[in-house]
Image (spheres, grey):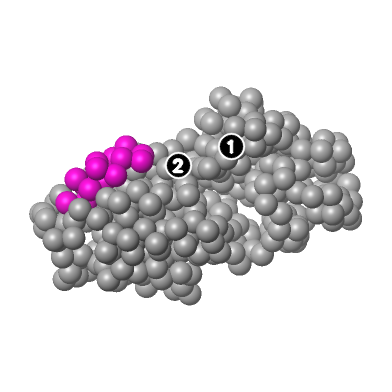
Amino acid sequence: MIYFAYPGDLETPTGGYHYDRRLIGELRRMGVKVETLALPNFSRMPDQHSLNSVQQALAAIPDQAVVVIDGLAFGVLDELAVKEAHRLRLVALCHHPLALETGLDERSRQTLLMSERRALECARATVVTSEHTRQILIDQFAVPSDRVSVALPGTDRVPFAGCEGDPIRLLTVASLTRRKAHDVLIDALAPLKSLPWQARFVGGKDFDPAWARELQERVNSLGLSQRIEFAGTVEDAQLEYQQADVFVLASRFEGYGMVFAEALAAGLPIVAARSGAVPDVVPAAAGLLVAPDDAQGLTEALQQILTSASLRRRLQIGAREVAATLPSWTDTASLVARKLEEVNNS
């Protein structure tokens, strides 16, 4: 029996929760018994009531059980991790170190850095979603290299998008948070009003409502309200990829960037920022990468892809070639299952 703990609602529409859902589903399909454990939905540092609830939930788990805890929770549960480390076989699942979130003040960043470092010391193994994140944990969180394993997110084999829109349809899939840099993308699109394009921003608005409102105001003030649509959360993200011509996302940092892999799986040309693990996911054959927070550079890349059908076609072919090499969710779950078995037998 594996216990899998996460904060809040497993159906939350983010890449991290999507990874958790698919991993749990694949592990069960492979015959691994997984019991899910919903922890309180705390943001960054939990209050005492939330800590008490987590403590009670962990205390109910049998001695020596393997317990996977999603990094959104595990990184701020250092005190409980220390307390339970000898009784339970703790495994951390780190999508993105909490201290590297955009918009933190230095005090908060240092607090999260120390908390997550201390928690990770208590994990018998840590699973990450990219080699880039693995190296960060080794370099900045002092996690021994032999205790960090990479399980890249899987992708589903899907039909390729036709990429024949007129005007060209730009797609962004990301929650409206500062790290995703929708502001940079909006500023980059503003000088391109004379070109034929429509942009669709798919992603939840509830994670940072003030930022979501600021983004809408930015679009309005730049006269782009007829060109950029905030679609919110959608039920069928795959349909979005199929109806798009180019995928664009200027994230300031990505621990992996599942949406880039999903865009590649659909054969979409990509324009993105060269941040975090993005260059590992998006090769030059499939996308144009610019420096993070470089609105002018992003404008130039978008102008190239909007005005050159041959460039779009070349990147489209590159994306289709990369799609054939992407791991499946079965591949992902198999790697994790082997690591969990090792922990169980240690």
To which residue does mark 2 refer? 253
Question: Which quadrant of the view contains residue 37?
Answer: bottom right
- Residue 271, which numbered label? none
Count of numbered circles on the image:
2
Horizontal and vertical percent position of residue 64: 85, 44
Q: Is mark 1 on a helix, strand or loop?
A: loop
Residue at position x 51%, y 42% in the image: 102
Relative to 167, does residue 121 appear above or below in the rendering?
Answer: above
Name the main secondary structure of what is drawn in magenta. Answer: helix
Horizontal and vertical percent position of residue 92: 68, 43
Depth order, front residue of 329/342: 329
**Disc 1 residue crowd, few under 14, some 14–19, many 20+, Cα 10 Å:** few
The answer to which of marks 2 and 1 sits earlier in the sequence is 1
Residue at position x 75%, y 49% in the image: 46
Where does the magenta region start and end? 289-303
To which residue does mark 1 refer? 105
Q: Is mark 2 on a helix, strand or loop?
A: loop
Query: Is residue 187 among the parts visible in the rendering?
Result: yes
Amino acid type at circle 2 is Phe
Q: In which quarter of the image is the C terminus?
A: top right
Taking the magenta stretch, the answer to whether it contains residue 244 is no
Residue at position x 55%, y 38% in the image: 100
